[in-house]
Image: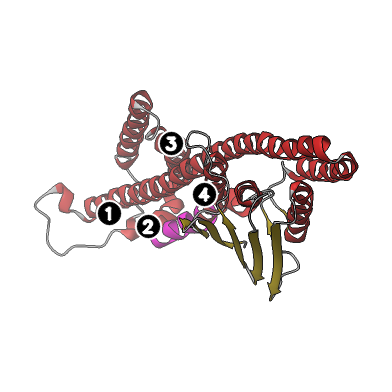
């Protein structure tokens, strides 16, 4: 970011110290100084004025509405008039600089002195056009870059606001499901409820410590999921079996993930796949291979969700994935033969 901020200054210095002096050296301006020093100083100073007037006043206002465009056009018109007046200046031309002609010219402008005057006027206009065009190009690129940065900043703030909203939505969802589990234990097994309550406190601490962070270490998120599963097991009987597996290949020590991005799928699997009447096997798998995370859940559909209330957590999670990992994930959700499957492939870096 610092390099980008310094780039306009570098361009201005390159123009003022390198490009414009080089053009002046190539053209007859440097030779005017011998007999027209005040004019040369005035003209060179005017070229710098033209550059900065276009660069920092006229060009930015071309992108800011009609009134600003009128002001920019007025500045351009003023520079044209002043340049025309400068081009009408009668140069003092040394006698030795005037070539002798064998025949008498037929028109005043065809005299050697008149030819040199036309050459000098063309040099004035050429330098003006080059300076104005360069300044206009640099100013336009700088203004377009500024607008892009402003749009990106606005988009970033919008995404931050949306993510904050989704995180607020996640917390009540998590609390409702977990408190429902604790309530069930209080009615059936008070001793287990005490242990479950301590687990709940650890989960809540993790949630409120990391919910505002952009990313957390992947190992911390895995431990969070494991603790959540252990808490939910307190409301299961022997007919429900939860299989949680973690496989790591080419593991990166700095692997990180957005906090609580996977818990929604785990919640759904445990909420709708637990049975107290028939055998139910719930599979939750996580595999890390370099930058890629492969996450799957598979559970029987024992409890049918109501049409009106189902899908809120999944929709919320998908929106978070769109904001945090655009173009870097694939999410497939299938329900067939009374089995619900979720497959998420996520590129972490």
Q: Alpha carbon of mark 1 to alpha carbon of mark 2: how far?
A: 9 Å
Residue bearing the label numbered 3: 60
Q: x%, y% of residue 54?
A: 42, 39
Q: Alpha carbon of mark 3 to alpha carbon of mark 1: how far?
A: 34 Å
Q: x%, y% of residue 265?
A: 61, 51
Q: Alpha carbon of mark 1 to alpha carbon of mark 4: how far?
A: 63 Å
Q: Tell me the magenta residue range.
A: 15-28
Q: x%, y% of residue 40?
A: 44, 46
Q: Is residue 38 visible?
A: no
In the displayed structure image, the side of residue 293 where residue 186 appears, left or right: right
Q: Residues within 10 Å of mark 4 (few under 14, many from 20)?
A: few
Hey, which residue is sitting farthest top in the picture?
Answer: 67
Q: x%, y% of residue 66?
A: 33, 26
Residue bearing the label numbered 1: 119
Residue 296 lies in the magenta-colored region: no
Residue bearing the label numbered 4: 322
**Secondary structure mostly taken by the magenta-highlighted segment of the chain:** helix
Tell me the quadrant of the picture where the C terminus can be found: bottom right
Residue in the image at 65% along x and 58% along y: 279
In the displayed structure image, the side of residue 31 where residue 349 appears, left or right: right
Secondary structure under tag 2 reads loop
């Amino acid at each position: 970011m610092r390099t980008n901020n310094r780039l306009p200054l570098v361009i201005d210095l390159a123009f003022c110290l390198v490009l414009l002096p080089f053009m002046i050296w190539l053209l007859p301006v440097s030779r005017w100084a011998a007999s027209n020093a005040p004019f040369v100083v005035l003209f060179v100073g005017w070229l710098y004025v033209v550059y900065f007037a276009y660069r920092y006043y006229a060009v930015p206002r071309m992108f800011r509405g009609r009134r600003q465009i009128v002001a920019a056009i007025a500045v351009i018109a003023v520079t044209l008039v002043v340049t025309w007046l400068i081009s009408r200046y009668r140069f003092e031309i040394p006698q030795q600089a005037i070539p002798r002609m064998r025949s008498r010219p037929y028109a005043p402008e065809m005299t050697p002195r008149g030819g040199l005057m036309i050459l000098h006027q063309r040099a004035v206009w050429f330098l003006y056009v080059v300076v104005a065009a360069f300044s206009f190009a640099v100013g336009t690129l700088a203004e377009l870059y500024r607008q892009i940065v402003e749009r990106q900043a606005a988009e970033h703030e919008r995404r931050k606001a949306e993510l904050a909203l989704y995180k607020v939505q996640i917390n009540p969802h998590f609390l409702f499901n977990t408190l429902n589990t604790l309530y069930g234990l209080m009615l059936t097994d008070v001793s287990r409820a005490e242990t479950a309550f301590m687990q709940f406190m650890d989960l809540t601490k993790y949630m409120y410590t990391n919910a505002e962070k952009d990313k957390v270490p992947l190992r911390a998120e895995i431990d969070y999921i494991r603790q959540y599963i252990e808490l939910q097991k307190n409301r299961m009987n022997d007919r429900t079996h939860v299989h949680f597996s973690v496989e790591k290949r080419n593991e990166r020590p700095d692997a990180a993930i957005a906090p609580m991005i996977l818990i929604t799928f785990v919640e759904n699997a445990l909420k709708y796949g637990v049975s107290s009447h028939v055998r139910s096997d719930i599979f939750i798998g996580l595999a890390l291979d370099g930058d890629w995370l492969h996450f799957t859940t598979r559970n029987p559909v024992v409890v049918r969700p109501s049409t009106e209330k189902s899908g809120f957590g999944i929709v919320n999670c998908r929106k978070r994935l769109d904001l945090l990992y655009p173009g870097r994930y694939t999410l497939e959700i299938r329900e067939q033969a009374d089995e619900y499957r979720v497959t998420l492939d996520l590129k972490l870096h």
